[in-house]
């Protein structure tokens, strides 16, 4: 009984070779594309980092003052410098509070004592939204939630702010 020789035809050889080379080339193209697509998602955002707002703790009074600072924002592959702002003051216990100026109604900017009619309150000019000094929304005005508060730390006597986070509803 003779042993049957297994032979690869020229057509099969070409098929295997082209499939192998084609697959290798496709993987070589797809891997960098996939990495580019996923990479921005894997990057840590600057938004969560605490940045110095160039304000000494000694200069913070019990009167809210507007501070501004810049952060590098990465949106996908687009990097830009964004100006952030906060209303900063010390409360009755001497604790530092940093409120987001973004109104919780539709996102306009609030100002401290922005209306002569409502002293000692934040005021939003868009729809007469109001907040008490502690950031709580005044019931019966359009905002339905308190102002967000920034994460913060003090280092070498200077204030650092991070991300603005929502508080409990009033
Ligand atoms: S956006 Fe502030 S009250 Fe409407």
Image (tube, helix red, strand yellow):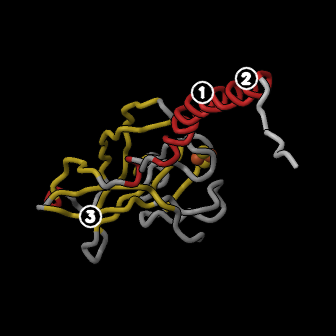
**Marks 1 and 3 in Cβ contact (< 8 Å):** no
Between circles 1 and 2, the one closer to the viewer is 2
Q: Nearer the viewer, mark 2 or mark 3?
A: 2
User: Quick one: 124 or 164, which is closer to the camera?
Assistant: 164
Judge the density around disc 2: few (<14), some (14-19), many (≥20) Cα neighbours within 10 Å.
few
Query: Of the residues under marks 1 and 3, which one precedes in the sequence?
Result: 1
The location of residue 170, given as percent across then percent down, is 59, 71
Depth-wise, is mark 1 or mark 3 nearer the camera?
1
Q: In the displayed image of the protein, which residue is found farthest to the front?
A: 1
Choose the circle earlier in sequence order: 2 or 3.
Answer: 2
Label of residue 153 in the image: 3
* Percent position of residue 148, x then y: 48, 59
Alpha carbons under labels 1 and 2: distance apart: 16 Å
Q: Is residue 121 above or below residue 27?
A: below
Give the distance between the C-alpha atoms of the residues marked 1 and 3, in whole angstroms.
51 Å
Residue at image point 88% right, 49% down: 1
Label at residue 14:
2
Q: Residue at x 46, y 54 (%)?
A: 122
Residue 36 lies left or right of residue 3; in this view the side is left
Mark 3, secondary structure of its residue: strand
Nearer to the camera, 36 or 74: 36
Circles 1 and 2, Cβ within 8 Å, touching? The answer is no
Q: In the rendering, at what x and y percent does residue 31 appear?
A: 56, 36
Which residue is denoted by mark 1 in the rendering? 25
Q: Residue furthest right?
A: 1
Residue 96 x, y percent position in the rendering: 29, 66
Depicted 151 relative to depicted 70: above or below = below
Neighbour tally class for label 1: few under 14, some 14-19, many 20 plus, Cα within 10 Å: few
């Amino acid at each position: 009984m003779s042993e049957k020789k297994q032979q690869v035809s020229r057509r099969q050889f070409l098929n295997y070779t082209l499939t192998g080379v084609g697959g290798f080339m496709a993987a070589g193209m797809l891997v960098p594309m996939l990495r580019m697509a996923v990479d921005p998602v894997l990057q840590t955002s600057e938004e969560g980092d605490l940045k110095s707002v160039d304000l000494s703790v000694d200069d913070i009074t019990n009167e809210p003052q507007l501070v501004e600072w810049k952060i590098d924002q990465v949106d996908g592959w687009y990097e830009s410098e964004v100006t952030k702002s906060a209303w900063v003051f010390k409360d009755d216990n001497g604790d530092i509070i940093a409120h987001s100026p973004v109104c919780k109604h539709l996102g306009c900017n609030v100002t401290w004592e922005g209306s002569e009619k409502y002293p000692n309150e934040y005021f939003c000019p868009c729809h007469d939204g109001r907040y008490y000094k502690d950031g709580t929304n005044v019931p019966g005005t359009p905002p339905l939630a308190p102002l967000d508060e920034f994460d913060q730390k003090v280092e070498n006597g200077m204030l650092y702010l991070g991300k603005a986070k929502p508080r409990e509803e009033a």
